[in-house]
Image (cartoon, grey):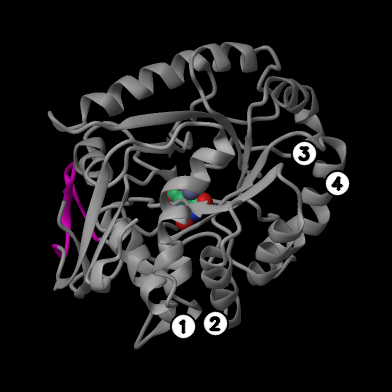
Amino acid sequence: MSTQALNHITLTRPDDWHLHVRDGEALRTVVPHTAAQFGRAIIMPNLKPPVTTAAQALAYAGRIRAAVPVGMAFEPLMTLYLTDKLPADEIARAKDAGVVAVKLYPAGATTNSDAGVTDIRKTYKTLEAMQKAGMPLLVHGEVTSPEIDLFDREAVFIEQQLQPLRKDFPELRIVMEHITTKEAAQYVAESDQYLGATLTAHHLLYNRNAIFTGGIRPHYYCLPVLKREVHRQALVAAATGGNARFFLGTDSAPHPAHLKEHATGCAGCYTAHAAIEMYAEVFDAAGALDQFEAFASFNGPAFYGLPRNSGTITLKRESWTPPESFAFGEAELKPLRSGEALPWKLVG
Ligand code: DOR
Ligand code: ZN
């Protein structure tokens, strides 16, 4: 990577290791945003109905590819949605079809998780097959019990679910997705090579005050929810600290604006339009631009056992303001920080 006078950054083309692109018309808005920045992205399977077979994953990959603008090279990396009933033999079919991972949503944890796992023990045969096949498990790490405080659900998940799971499957590769707490950052840092974690731009940039500044701000609401400043600082330290098991995953999660600006607004922040610029801002503010390329472009492929991308992208220190909203099928899509200027700009 070159950080010429720190006004330009050129880095190996990065990947997004956690992304929601939805389906249908929505693909035409969001896929080009991601393809303009990233070489590959891990595509979350929480469609309605969820992606639970290799055949469905292949068909979905085809629809995503059809939305990539001509001349752009972008590869969707597909995942299956773990349910209580995902048959163990689907793992071999998934592997043959090029599916790269399986996603665990505890039932009820977040958007389109109703079909998720009600009891992790029900999935043990499938996890066994995954461990054997070297198929990683991607985890939405929050307990769902209503009596557990919303802000504690990630830390409690680690104790009650993740630790026992890792004991039972010591060689299952697991990614704790979108970590939000110092407990999670510490747990991942202290664990072995079988556990990694993704970090979003929004959890690195904001603490929970952002949801309530001057009134309730639904576009800052996501799950796991933003936490206190002490947690944000721990996440920045993890991202910039040189540990190769932390890597970039935006969790960019588009919803129609009218369903976020709603009495029961949907969880999810849309960042794909300017994701790499927002991460650059985080690393710049932390004085850690020298660590940026490893986090964005090297650590993810290393964990997944994939080659790094060829080619580069270049960012320039130049203030610009992304569009306030985008067309989203019949609806409107408002990105995080809508209408605000960003200090870094993708220029090539
Ligand atoms: O904020 C979130 N949005 N968190 C998730 O886990 C799911 C995602 C979505 O699909 O909208
Ligand atoms: Zn997600």
Q: Is residue 113 magenta?
A: no
- How far apart, in angstroms, are the residues tagged by discs 2 and 3? 33 Å
Q: Read off the residue under disc 2.
A: 229
Give the mark nearer the N terminus: 1 vs 3.
3
Horizontal side, residue 132 vs residue 277: left or right: right
Taking the image as drawn, is residue 227 in sight? Answer: no
Q: How many marks?
A: 4
Q: Read off the residue under disc 3.
A: 119
Q: Position of residue 125 (x, y in %)?
A: 79, 22
The type of residue carrying mark 1 is Asn
Vertical arrangement, residue 250 with respect to residue 56, above or below: below
Horizontal side, residue 83 vs residue 325: left or right: right
- Labels 1 and 2 touching (C-beta < 8 A): yes
- Labels 4 and 2 touching (C-beta < 8 A): no
Stretch of the chain drawn in magenta: 323-334
Give the mark nearer the N terminus: 4 vs 2.
4
Q: Nearer the viewer, mark 4 or mark 3?
A: 4
The type of residue carrying mark 2 is Glu
Give the mark nearer the N terminus: 2 vs 3.
3
Q: Read off the residue under disc 4.
A: 164
Taking the image as drawn, is residue 226 in sight? Answer: yes
- How far apart, in angstroms, are the residues tagged by discs 4 and 1? 33 Å
